[in-house]
Amino acid sequence: MQVHTVGEGTPEVAVVGAVHGDEPCGARAIERFLDSDPEVDRPAKLIIANERALDQGVRYVETDLNRALPGDPESDLYEERLAYDLMQEVRDCVSLGIHSTVSYQDAFANVAYLNERKRDIVAHLPVTGVVDFTVVADGRSVELPGFVDIEAGYQGSAEAVDNAYDCLRAFLQTTGVLPGDPPAPDPGFYEVTEPIYKDPGKEYEFLGENFERVDAGEQFATVDGAPLTADEPFWPILMSSDGHDVLLGYRSNYHGPLSSLSLSAVDADADAANADATDDPVAED
């Protein structure tokens, strides 16, 4: 794991790339930022997490780092030890994690247990949408109190690196590390309601477009050539024909622009959950 610090003092802001080694855009964006010799107003950490997997061009070496949090320093598994070390680096930081996908070309943000602090961050990222993954967060970094993630675009693409770099700079402006006003794109807000799993041994083809409404009764995929239709309206998230062995993607509801979202009820639950997680940072995205 590479940990680079810019500025003087103890950082309370962090950017994390290469949690998955086959998603190099975060590492490349961090390298580009460091090469620019930035002048900063407060310190920040820039972390290239899974160097070993990045060097091999694989998602992970022994187990998925983003499912291994909070980690175990005594584990026999490389990523479980690495997860513990990563948690120590980000435990007191507001953090941005950078990922990429095989299902969508533009950048979007991922959150869980949305509160005002997280909304303030994602409201200033140059993304097309914000997706709440609370119902399926299951131990990933996005579940941590001060953590938001982005999916920067297609895995391995130059566009994903550019998107990641733009989001990195906007995040550092939002958190006061870089001078200047961050963008305010007012992206749409989507709430994941459930995953759609694949039946083992069957071939799936996704026919729709992510973030575009699927109406009730509309065909959105095929299973071994037979139509798969929606029983109620939804917006697909991270759906792809072959991006995941057991998961076709997620159903979500669209709630309108982020600026129109009322968090009065959500904040109380999220702040309570995040306060607990701050004392014992075991949760995650």
Image: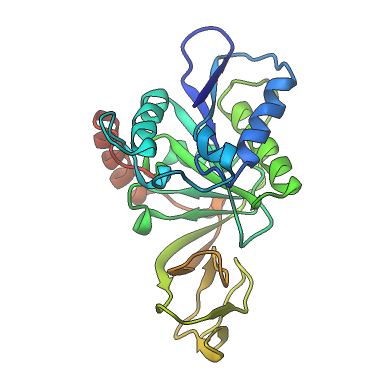
Asked if 31 appears above or below 240 in the picture, the reply is above
Q: Position of residue 135 (x, y in %)?
A: 35, 59
Residue at figure coordinates x 64%, y 29% from the top left: 30
Q: Please state the horizontal and vertical placement of residue 199, each as a whole percent of the image.
A: 40, 79
Q: Is residue 145 above or below residue 188?
A: above
Along the viewing direction, whichever of 193 and 281 lies nearer the viewer: 281
Residue 142 seen in render: no
Q: Is residue 209 left or right of residue 95?
A: right
What residue appears at the point 33 percent right and 51 percent down from the top-left corner? 265
The image shows a total of numbered marks equal to 0
State the image coordinates of residue 88 (x, y, percent, origin top left): 36, 24
Q: Residue at x 52, y 81 (%)?
A: 203
Quadrant in which residue 181 is drawn:
top right
Q: Is residue 64 above or below residue 6?
A: below
Q: Give the percent coordinates (x, y) of residue 122.
A: 55, 42
Task: State the residue at coordinates (41%, 47%).
Answer: 64
As drawn, is 134 to the left or to the right of 175? left
What scheme was used to colour the molecule? rainbow
Task: Give the quarter of the image for residue 243.
Answer: bottom right
In the displayed orientation, state which residue is furthest to the bottom: 226
Q: Residue lying farthest top?
A: 8
Name above or below for residue 249 compared with residue 76: below
- In-front residue for pair 178/241: 241
Q: Is residue 118 visible?
A: yes
